[in-house]
Image (cartoon, helix red, strand yellow):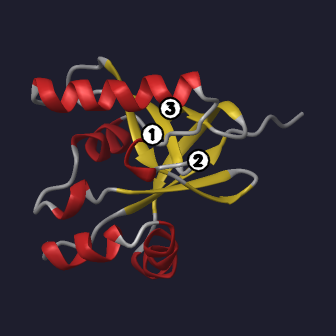
Amino acid sequence: MSERRQDWTQTIIDEFRANNGTVSTAGFGRRLVLMHQRGAHSGIERVTPVTGIHRDDNTWLVAASRSGSPQNPGWYYNLLAHPDLTIETPDDGTVQVHARELPRAERDAAWPLFVAANPAFAGYEQLTTRVIPVLALERHTVTG
C-alpha cells in the first residue's frame, strides 16, 4: 500500500474512533466498520475501514469492491484464510465475527443494499468484469 493510501486509511480510522463511528471524510457517515483481520500469509493484524451494511442484529455485509479494480482487495484473501476476526462498529462497539462469502444468489440479492448506501458501488461494478464478492460478517454467539 502506498504511503499516501496508508495515511488516508489511518485518517479514516482515527476519525471513526474519535467520533464514535461517524466519519465525515468522503461522506461516509456511520456506514463504516473497521475490520481487524490477519494477513493471509504474514499473519500480521491489519485494520481496514470498509462500508458495512448492518443487515440484522448479528450480521454486517461487506463488499470486496476495491473501487472496481480487476482484482479483489487483499483483505478479501485475509478473510478467506482467517475468517474469525474482530470488527469495530458505530453502534455495537467491538464485535467478534466469522466471515462467510455469500453464494451467488444471496450475493446478488445483497448487492442493491450497497448501491443504495453509496451509488459509487454501481460504478465499481461497471469498471470490472469480475463479480464483486460480498461477505457476511456474522456475530459469534455464545450458547450455553
Q: Are marks 1 and 3 in contact (CB under 8 Å)?
A: yes
Residue type at mark 1: give it. Pro
First in sequence, mark 2 or 3: give its number. Answer: 2
Q: Amino acid at mark 2?
A: Arg
Viewer-side label of 2, 3: 2
Q: Quadrant of the N terminus?
A: top left
Determine whether, in the image, residue 137 is placed left or right of residue 71.
right
Task: Please tell me the numbered disc located at residue 75.
Answer: none
Alpha carbon distance from label 1 to label 3: 6 Å
Q: Residues within 10 Å of mark 1 (few under 14, many from 20)?
A: some
Tag 2 secondary structure: loop
Nearer the observer, 4 or 51: 4
Determine which quarter of the picture holds residue 92: top right
Snapshot quadrant of residue 10: top left
Judge depth for marks 2 and 1 and give the one in front: 2
Q: Secondary structure at mark 3?
A: strand
Residue 100 shows in the view: yes
Q: Residues within 10 Å of mark 3 (few under 14, many from 20)?
A: many
Mark 2 sits on what residue? 30
- Name the residue that disc number 1 marks: 83
Q: Which mark is residue 85?
A: 3
Identify which amino acid the numbered label 3 is placed on. Leu
Left or right: 127, with 117 as reference point: left
Of 123 and 41, which appears nearest the observer?
Answer: 123
The answer to whether any part of residue 47 appears in the image is no
Residue 89, how many percent across, how many down? 61, 38
Tag 2 and tag 1, C-beta contact below 8 Å: no
